[in-house]
Amino acid sequence: MKVDRRLVALCGSERRLRVLAVLANAFRPVTGYRVSLVGGVPVSKAYDELRRLEKSGLIGRSGPSGWVLLDPDLGSLLRKRIRAVWWKDWFDRVDRRERADRMFPDRLRATPRPRFSKDPGWTPRHPSLYKRNPRKDEALTEMGLRPSKHA
């Protein structure tokens, strides 16, 4: 993990910055061992930093073995400048995004069609405004959605 020297000066040491960066990027409580692995800090030094940061009030314990960053402003600053994420957590986030992307067409299909109170012989005043690009219909068909009925 490459670190910014300005952030090192802000935090006091590179080791402390690495520990804080891991906690800032975690979306659930993190064990000290995982902090050491993700941050590239020796295990004993990671626990020393965690205890020191806990005494200062920047981090706290969540449950028997997890650590969390208590200051949201510090977390947002570090997340903007450093990305330190365990590979499994990274892929969990990717899986969540992919599931949400797959659910979007399903929500579109489930949307009820609007009902218009038009008689069957109705035609618009300016039909050219109602023409749809055929490529859009092809894209809708590929997604499994209905294409336009009027050409």
Image (cartoon, grey):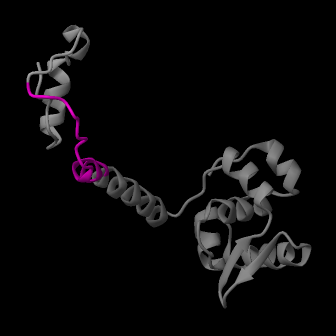
- Residue 39 coordinates in the image, percent (x, y): 64, 63
129 lies left or right of 139: right
Residue 48, horizontal then vertical, whole percent: 80, 78
x and y percentages locating residue 92 in the rendered image: 42, 63
Q: Quadrant of residue 50?
A: bottom right
- Tell me which residue sits at (69%, 77%) in the image: 67
On the rendered structure, is 12 left or right of 109?
A: right
Could you tell me which residue is drawn at 45 percent across and 59 percent down? 93
Q: Is residue 106 left or right of residue 57?
A: left
Tell me, yes or no, whether the highlighted magenta stretch contains residue 31: no
Q: Position of residue 146 (x, y in %)?
A: 14, 38
Say which of 49 and 89 sits in front.
Answer: 89
The quadrant holding residue 131 is: top left
Which segment did they paint magenta?
A: 104-120
Q: Nearer the viewer, residue 122 or 106?
A: 122
Residue found at x 83% / y 42%: 6
Depicted 119 relative to depicted 97: above or below: above
- Choose between 72 and 146: the one closer to the eye: 146
Q: Which quadrant of the figure contains the C terminus?
A: top left
Q: Is residue 17 visible?
A: yes
The outermost residue toward the right is 56
